[in-house]
Structures are given as structure tokens and as C-alpha cells.
Amino acid sequence: MRDVVNEIRGRGAELVVVGNGSVEQARAFRAEQKLPFPLFTDPSLESYRQAELRHGLSSTLSPRAVLHGLAAFREGFRQTRTKGAAMQQGGVFVIGKGGRLLYQYASREAGDHPDNRELLRALDDGSREPAAPAAG
């Protein structure tokens, strides 16, 4: 999502990441990755539970997770030491004005991410005023 942060901001929104390591790990990760957006952390995993995101061995070590890892390796990404809850899967949420949920994506396994075009489309759709109810 780092590669679409400018497009997200161009639509009047902000990319915010929630990790699950310690505060110190989050600070180190932010500096190491030179993240150009806010990073928060929830070591308790409560936000992950509330969002009903997957957690466990089967989603972390699935055959598809291995394929995602190989694809990331080919693209130049390298796995470093895991920080935080290694078995916790992530998700993506687009929240509009007034706290309205415009889009949600729960990763099925490690390395599973939504298509960035879906996120941008959700922002575009959410920026439109809801249609007024038809008079009847």
C-alpha cells in the first residue's frame, strides 16, 4: 500500500497502519522502513479480535502463504525477524466520513493483500454524497 499512499492522500484520506508489536518494536519498524504514514500498535490484539481477523497456524503456514512468500521474495522483499504476534493475520479497512465503513478486507493467510485498485475505488465511491431517499 506504500506505493499508493500519494493517491490515497490525493483523495483526501490518510493511510494508517496498526501493528501488534511493542511500542519499541513499532518505533524501530517505522524508522527501519521509513514509513511515510502513521503507525500505531495494539499488542493486546483487541482491535484484531474486534475486526474478526484470522489468527492461527493454519492461516500462517498454509500453502498459499508459502506462494505469497515466494512472490514477495521475487519482488525483492526479505523476511526479517518477526516482531509481535506471528500468527495474527491483518486486514484493510477504508473508513469514510462519520466513521462509515466503506471497505473491508480480512487477509486469508500470511501475505494475502487486497488489490490497491479496490481501496482507491472504495475511497472514490465513499467521497460521493449518499443519494437522497426517493420521495414516495
Image (tube, rainbow, N blue to C red):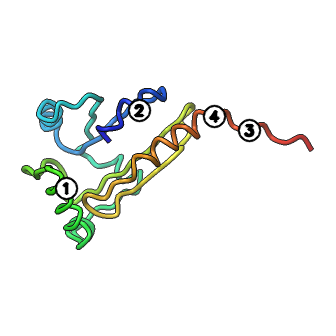
- Give yes or no for contact between labels 1 and 2 (Cβ–Cβ under 8 Å): no
Q: For the residue labelled by badge 2, is the local secondary structure a helix, a strand or a loop?
A: helix
Horizontally, is 73 left or right of 56 in the view?
Answer: left
Residue bearing mark 1: 72
* Closer mark to the observer between disc 4 and disc 1: 1
Horizontally, is 71 left or right of 108 in the view?
Answer: left
Amino acid identity at mark 2: Glu
Q: Residue at x 53, y 35 (%)?
A: 96
What numbered label is drawn on residue 128? 4
Q: Earlier in the sequence, mark 1 or mark 2?
A: 2
Q: CA distance from mark 2 to mark 4?
A: 17 Å
Q: CA distance from mark 1 to mark 3?
A: 41 Å
As rendered, which of 67 and 83 lies closer to the eye?
Answer: 67
Q: For the residue labelled by badge 1, is the local secondary structure a helix, a strand or a loop?
A: helix
Total count of labels: 4
In this picture, is 72 found above or below 59? Answer: above
* Residue 35: quadrant of the picture: top left
Residue bearing mark 2: 7
Q: For the residue labelled by badge 4, is the local secondary structure a helix, a strand or a loop?
A: loop
As rendered, which of 76 and 47 lies closer to the eye?
Answer: 76
Amino acid identity at mark 4: Arg
Q: Position of residue 30 (x, y in %)?
A: 18, 32
Residue bearing mark 3: 131
Specify the quadrant that holds the C terminus.
Answer: top right
Q: Position of residue 46 (x, y in %)?
A: 33, 48
Amino acid identity at mark 3: Ala
Q: CA distance from mark 4 to mark 1?
A: 35 Å
Q: Residue at x 40, y 46 (%)?
A: 116
